[in-house]
Structure formats: structure tokens, C-alpha cells
């Protein structure tokens, strides 16, 4: 075992002895957001290769990530939204002290089928589509076709962020919306459905879907970084108390050249 691995392993032992949740001192357990998932998995592969510490990543949604942290069954909760007041209260009741770490920035991309001639929508038009005001693409400059509205499940942090940043408290999503369980599932549904619209993390956009401009702004690294893209949000990793030992080493990857490269290559934006 080289010196760096000895240091990390020793730090991991101290960290977990101080109240970590992993079963073994050389293991980090992560759970939560499917949006943060690609970053977590990329970091995990690199971290295990360079330190020997095993990292497991589950993608059960931001809400379940929060529950795992509260129940002390994970070391890091990956979340695409901030923890809610009720989650913080539940954590305090169990002696858990959540600490947030912003790992990257993300734009929620509004995606349509590549064959759809609509290239831009206002936030008001997107809200109108999702609350049922507009039900045909012809009402927003598209073809004469019924809009297939795709949303995420209630446990999704992306769903919560979309509601907050686009819908607002007074505009519920139509009951006719179809629900998908992950960013990838939304992308695949839109890619195979000419009249569909959905929303996904910027890092999930590929040639199978088309990300439209929102209020005239393209969703890309520059506009997310400077805050001009109107559906921008931070991505989080939460720990129980300040990160220590191997967990801190893992989260600190976001500030290293290698970590920044991974974040950028995945289509997300360095904080």
C-alpha cells in the first residue's frame, strides 16, 4: 500500500469511527439523485482506482437520498435540490446534522423530439404546456399535434426544481402528464415520441433529443455558469456533519483538476 493510500485509509478509519455509516472503513455508500448520479459514479471509479476505497452509488432519487442520510444508511446523499425543511427536521430528530456541499451547477434542459420544429419557448409557454393551458403544439408555434407532457416522479429533485423554477406555487402540473422515473427514461421517451416534451439535467442531453432555448437563452455551460439561463440550479452532496476522512477526500474531488474535467466532460458545469 503506497503512502497516499495509507493516509486515505487511515483518515477513513478515523472518520467512520467518529460516526460514519459504512459497514467497513474502506467503503463509502452514496444514494440519491439520478442527475448527480453520473458525477458520483465517475468520481467513484476514479477514487476507488486511486485510493482503494470502495464506493457504491445508488440512484433512487433525491428524496430517498435524504431519507438514507437521515436513517444513517449512506455516507453521502446526492441531491439535485436543497433538503426540505421537513427533511431537516426529521434529520435533527434522529441526531443527524446535514451539511450541504455544492458539487456542480446544472441547467434543466427542456427537450423535444429532434423532428419538432419548435426551437424556443418562453418560460410562460412551458408553464402553460405543463399546467394544461396549451395542449396542442400549434398553440406555441409547432405542428398540429397533441402535446405529450412528460414529468418526473414525486421523489425527484429535478421535479421539485422544475416546479419551483418554472411552475411556481400557483400552477400545478396537469394530471394528464406522463411520469417517468429518471432523467434517462424521460430522454428516451421524448426521443421516441415526436409530440413529446420533457425536462432533464443538462448532462443527459444528446443527439436523441433537442434542447430548446428558454426565454431566448440556450442551455449550455456558459449560460448556466453566468446564470443567464433561467432554469439553473446547484447540485449537492450532503453529509452528516462536516465531511471527514475519505468522505472529505471524495467530495473534494470537485475542486481538483481531475474532478473538474470529469464534471465538464459529463456535460455539467463547474461551480
Image: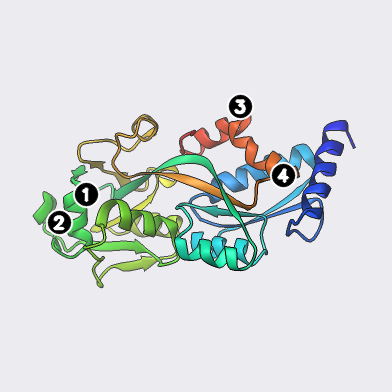
The colour style of the image is rainbow
Residue 177 pos. (x, y %):
28, 68
| Category of crowding for the residue at label 4, using alpha-carbon neighbours closer than 10 angstroms: few (below 14), some (14–19), many (at least 20) | some
Q: Residue at the location (70% across, 39% down)?
A: 249
Sequence order check: which comes first, mark 2 or mark 4? Answer: 2
Residue picked out by circle 4: 244
> Where's residue 37, x and y in %?
55, 51
Quadrant containing the N terminus is: top right
Q: Mark 2 = which residue?
A: 137
Among the 4 quarters of the image, the one containing residue 94 = bottom right
> In this view of the protein, which residue sits in the foreground, 116 or 260?
260
Ranked by sequence position, the earlier of labels 4 and 1 is: 1
Q: Helix or strand or loop: what does disc 3 sit on? A: helix
- Comparing labels 1 and 2, the label whose residue is closer to the camera: 2
Residue drawn at point x = 40 percent, y = 43 percent: 202
Residue labelled with disc 3: 257
- For label 1, count other residues whose C-alpha is less than 10 Å away and answer few (under 14), some (14-19) or many (20+): some
Q: CA distance from mark 2 to mark 4?
A: 51 Å
Q: CA distance from mark 2 to mark 3?
A: 44 Å
Inter-mark Cα distance, 1 to 2: 9 Å
Q: CA distance from mark 3 to mark 1?
A: 39 Å
Amino acid at each position: 500500500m503506497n503512502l497516499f493510500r495509507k493516509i486515505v485509509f487511515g483518515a477513513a478509519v478515523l472518520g467512520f469511527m467518529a460516526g460514519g455509516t459504512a459497514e467497513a472503513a474502506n467503503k463509502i455508500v452514496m444514494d440519491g439523485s439520478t442527475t448527480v448520479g453520473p458525477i458520483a459514479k465517475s468520481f467513484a471509479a476514479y477514487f476507488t482506482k486511486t485510493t482503494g476505497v470502495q464506493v457504491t452509488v445508488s440512484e433512487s432519487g433525491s428524496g430517498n437520498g435524504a431519507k438514507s442520510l437521515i436513517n444513517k444508511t449512506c455516507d453521502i446523499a446526492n441531491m439535485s435540490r436543497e433538503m426540505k425543511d421537513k427533511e431537516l427536521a426529521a434529520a435533527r430528530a434522529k441526531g443527524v446534522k446535514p451539511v450541504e456541499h455544492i458539487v456542480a451547477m446544472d441547467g434543466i434542459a427542456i427537450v423535444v423530439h429532434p423532428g419538432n420544429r419548435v426551437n424556443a419557448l418562453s418560460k410562460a409557454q412551458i408553464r402553460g404546456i405543463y399546467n394544461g393551458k396549451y395542449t396542442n403544439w400549434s398553440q406555441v408555434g409547432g405542428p398540429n399535434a397533441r402535446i405529450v407532457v412528460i414529468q418526473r416522479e414525486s421523489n425527484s429533485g429535478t421535479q421539485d426544481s422544475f416546479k419551483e423554477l418554472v411552475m411556481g406555487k400557483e400552477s400545478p402540473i396537469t394530471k394528464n402528464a406522463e411520469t417517468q422515473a429518471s432523467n434517462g427514461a424521460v430522454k428516451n421517451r421524448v426521443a421516441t415520441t415526436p409530440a413529446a416534451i420533457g425536462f432533464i439535467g443538462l448532462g443527459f442531453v444528446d443527439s436523441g433529443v433537442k434542447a430548446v432555448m428558454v426565454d431566448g437563452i440556450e442551455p449550455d455551460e456558459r449560460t448556466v455558469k453566468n446564470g443567464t439561463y433561467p432554469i439553473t440550479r446547484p447540485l449537492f452532496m450532503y453529509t452528516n456533519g462536516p465531511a471527514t476522512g475519505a468522505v472529505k477526500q471524495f467530495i473534494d474531488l470537485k475542486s481538483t483538476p481531475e474532478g473538474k474535467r470529469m464534471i465538464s466532460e459529463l456535460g455539467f458545469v463547474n461551480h
